[in-house]
Amino acid sequence: MSATISPLAPKKYPKMPDIEGARIATAEAGIKYKNRTDLLTMVFDAGTTVAGVFTKSKCPSAPVDFCRQNLGQGKARVLVVNSGNANAFTGKKGRASTAMTGEAAAKAASCAPDEVFLASTGVIGEPLDAGKFSHLLAGLVKDGRSDLWTEAAKAIMTTDTYPKLATATVKLGDADVTINGIAKGAGMIAPDMATMLSFIATDAPIAAPVLQDLLARGTAKTFNAVTVDSDTSTSDTLLMFATGTAARRGAPDITDAGDARLGAFRRALGKVLKSLALQVVRDGEGARKQVEVTVTGAKSARSAKRIALSIANSPLVKTAVAGEDANWGRVVMAVGKAGEPADRDLLSIWFGDIRLAHQGERDAAYSEEATSAYMKRDEIRIHADIGIGRGKATVWTCDLTKEYVAINGDYRS
């Protein structure tokens, strides 16, 4: 956790309601950090369903493998998360560590080993000594409380400068149901499904396959549309748990992803996921500005997204934003190198509402003064119209500052 909080941090944190059937506890296990919490448990009532999406990295962490293995049966009773060590690229030792943690958690929660879910975040390649914290799990499971969401978000931070929380309450049938979420992530963020770590819980009674469908669709335009530095983590994990306790208050059991009663819930989940994803971008290592990149007029939506990510991930575009320099030529460069269909003579570019380039050349009405004034804002919008089709996409990123280099130059020391 950084000493200075990001200037883009929220001014206040949401008041997080309880999720009936979910209890939280945190501890200081001293895995890497001193004098701060680095261990989180969430315990769920019997009958809780689970869904998850994970990194597309070909070098996934041991906890990602562990979760994938357990996800098939769709039930969850306990989640254990540690920060300070990713337990990634740790070979047999990594598998032994997840097995030991899984067994200790299953024993603590009196559940089957395949109802345990694990996540780890931090340095890659360092063996994780589960002996440092597995003995704490029984006490944590016993002491869990439903009102510790902010503490949960703090316990999973690494280089984050603030905890990330979001909540929504919505009708399912005639009953109110709640969705709470937390996330962590500041660097190595170019999720190929989720942020580094994010955990969502709801009291809605939703079957595991439906939950999986909701989550997978919800990530496409949220967590999969943010990038801090184009680097996909080995540990990306997004898990969602549904305790089903709202059924006691009359919420209907949802067993079909096409159920019309899911509409409001789907939208609310999308809002929670988007809020968490944008909080991750706004806490990008060293970030001073949030950047929204929209591409229109591409050959397809997929093509538009690839061009948008080419712009959002360009170090030259991101450093221009950091320097408040209206260097739109770098956007031209990023469109051209994306490897997607484009036509130089049809390209138009805007910063905010200011059109800088039109039909392949600088806009005749372009004002450097007005654009330089716009670049001083802490939220910047870049729009490129490719001019050849109807494909469109929006992604979010942050600027690239000297602090990013400083943070990552001595991350292990």
Image (cartoon, rainbow, N blue to C red):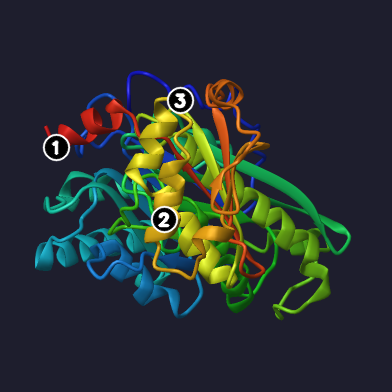
Q: Quarter-wise, where is residue 321 in the image?
A: top left
Position of 350 relative to 250 (above/below): above
Position of 367 relative to 328 (above/below): above
Position of 370 relative to 216 (above/below): above
Q: Which mark is residue 300?
A: none
233 or 70: nearer the eye? 233
> Alpha carbon of mark 1 to alpha carbon of mark 3: how far?
31 Å
Quadrant including the C terminus: top left
Residue at left offset 46%, top offset 63%:
306
Circle 3 packing at 10 Å, graded few (<14), some (14-19), many (20+), is many
Circle 1 packing at 10 Å, graded few (<14), some (14-19), many (20+), is few
Position of 260 relative to 167 (above/below): below
Q: Nearer the viewer, mark 2 or mark 1?
A: 2
Which residue is disc 1 drawn over?
412
Which residue is disc 3 drawn over?
324
Residue at left offset 45%, top offset 58%:
194
Q: Position of residue 275 (x, y in %)?
A: 60, 44
Q: Is residue 45 visible?
A: no
Q: Amino acid at mark 1?
A: Arg
Q: Which mark is residue 310?
A: 2
Helix, strand or loop at mark 2: helix
